Image (tube, helix red, strand yellow):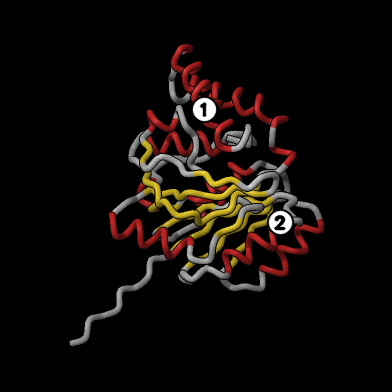
Amino acid sequence: MANKKKKKATVDIILPNYNSYEFIDETLKSIINQTYTNWKCIIVDDCSDKKTIKSLKYFSKNKKIKIYWLKKNYGAGYCRNYAIKKSKSSYIAFIDSDDIWKKDKLETQLRFMENNNYSFTYTSYETFGKKIKYVRPPNEFDYKKFIHNTSICTSTMVLKREILNKAKFTDTKICEDYFFKCELLKNCNAYCLDDYLTQYRIRRDSLQSNSLKNFYWIWKINREFNKLNILENLISLTFISFNSLIKYGFKNL
């Protein structure tokens, strides 16, 4: 009797969107062109402008893309949590509405996870927009390492549904993903695929002007949720600042 072909795992791609008219077409085309085809994209639109809505409605004709329309602006964290609740797949991937995936991103990363039995992975990535730079994060992260180096890019992450547990993004509009990653890493390690499979856009409106707000919210999350004392928190922010400067000069952490 011939061996049955192994069924491909399902992947839900979580995409929060707000006023991304300039970039969303390129982002969605990079998803549609994936060599791995057993995916569904869940977009939660955060009360965008008319131009962005028009672009999204064009892509909504694709049966693999599901869009939920919010009537009020809540922030990316709320949108991601909303999408996760709607998701039913074996794997969950994340991408921001201005970033781009290489066409073999999902296929390569899922093979890496299945071959090594990993539950949480991320990849190296290329920054673009203001300056092209290649960022190679550490090979492995646990919680203690991550609070000193936040170089896991959200748009590179793929994880198994089973590790989500009660982890979620905060509803704050800044550093919501820092909290989520901390919660995940308290229960499992994350592993790096050393291939540059994502292009991470650096935008002028998210550079230096937001850095102080980033540090304020990381400080707050570290104190209230991670229970770091003042000295531990200062050490965390010092290392995060240093690593951020090395990577791309105060892009959102």
Asked if the residue under mark 1 is in contact with the one under mark 2, i.e. CB atoms within 8 Å, the reply is: no
Label 1 amino acid?
Ile
| Foreground residue among 180 and 213 | 213
Quadrant, the N terminus? bottom left
Determine the residue positioned at 49% across, 34% down: 150
| Foreground residue among 178 and 72 | 178
Of label 2 and label 1, which has the lower sequence position?
A: 2
Asked whether the viewer can see residue 94, the reply is yes
- Dot 2, how many residues are within 10 Å of its Cα: few (below 14), some (14-19), or many (20+)? some
Q: Quadrant of residue 208?
A: top right
| Foreground residue among 195 and 229 | 195
Determine the residue positioned at 42% across, 62% down: 108
Name the element at disc 2. Answer: loop
Determine the residue positioned at 64% across, 57% down: 68
Q: 236 above or below 118?
A: above
Label number found at residue 231: none
| Foreground residue among 84 and 114 | 114
- Which residue is identified by label 2? 23
Relative horizontal placement of residue 177, taking residue 252 as reference (left or right): left
Q: Position of residue 37 (x, y in %)?
A: 48, 71
Asked whether the viewer can see residue 172, the reply is no
Gap in Å between the C-alphas at discs 2 and 1?
A: 28 Å
Q: Position of residue 213 (x, y in %)?
A: 66, 26
Relative horizontal placement of residue 33, taking residue 57 as reference (left or right): left
Label 2 amino acid?
Phe
- Which residue is identified by label 1? 240
